[in-house]
Amino acid sequence: MKKIVFFVFLMVLSLSVSTVFATDAKSELNSDNPAAIENRGDKLSEEEINQIEMRIEEIRDMDKSELTEEERVELRKELKDIKDIVTSPRGIYISVGGLLLILILILLLT
């Protein structure tokens, strides 16, 4: 009976823990999108920050009235990618329910 309870709590715990990873597949550096920066750690380097700022200034200074609809969509997508890189959460997060289950499991098994 104790093993069954242990495995049930283990299963519920494994299904309730949510994790968020710092990097994603969209943030790779490539030649198509010069503003995309690979997000490798807790903070962006000074060079990456300068590159992002320069690209944002280029986009602001553009005459957008001459652009086609496709080019405007690409610019919006690029700006959203930059925003995702700058504001992406860093670390692993455990939900409140998962934390409570861990505490209950520890109390039951000790």
Image (cartoon, helix red, strand yellow):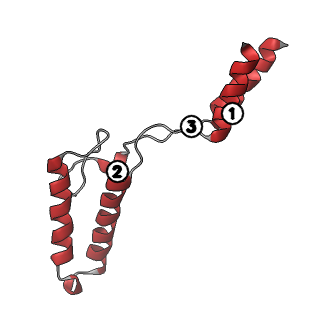
Nearer to us of marks 3 and 2 is 3
Determine the CA span between mark 1 and mark 2.
Answer: 34 Å
User: First in sequence: mark 1 or mark 2?
Assistant: 2
- Above-or-below relation of 20 to 35: above
Task: State the mark number for residue 25.
Answer: none
57 vs 23, left or right, is left
Q: Where's the N terminus, which quadrant?
A: top right
* Mark 2 residue type: Lys
- Above-or-below relation of 85 to 76: above
Q: Secondary structure at mark 3?
A: loop
User: First in sequence: mark 3 or mark 2?
Assistant: 2
Determine crowd level at label 2: few under 14, some 14-19, many 20+ residues with C-alpha closer than 10 A. few
Name the spot of residue 26 as percent of width and height, x first: 34, 50
Q: Are marks 3 and 2 in contact (CB under 8 Å)?
A: no
Quarter where residue 16 is shown: top right
* Mark 1 residue type: Leu
Q: Secondary structure at mark 2?
A: helix
Quarter where residue 15 is shown: top right
User: Residue at label 1?
Assistant: 100
Determine crowd level at label 3: few under 14, some 14-19, many 20+ residues with C-alpha closer than 10 A. few
Q: Are marks 1 and 3 in contact (CB under 8 Å)?
A: no
101 vs 20, left or right, is right
Name the spot of residue 48 as percent of width and height, x first: 18, 50
Determine crowd level at label 1: few under 14, some 14-19, many 20+ residues with C-alpha closer than 10 A. few
* Mark 3 residue type: Ile
Quarter where residue 76 is shown: bottom left
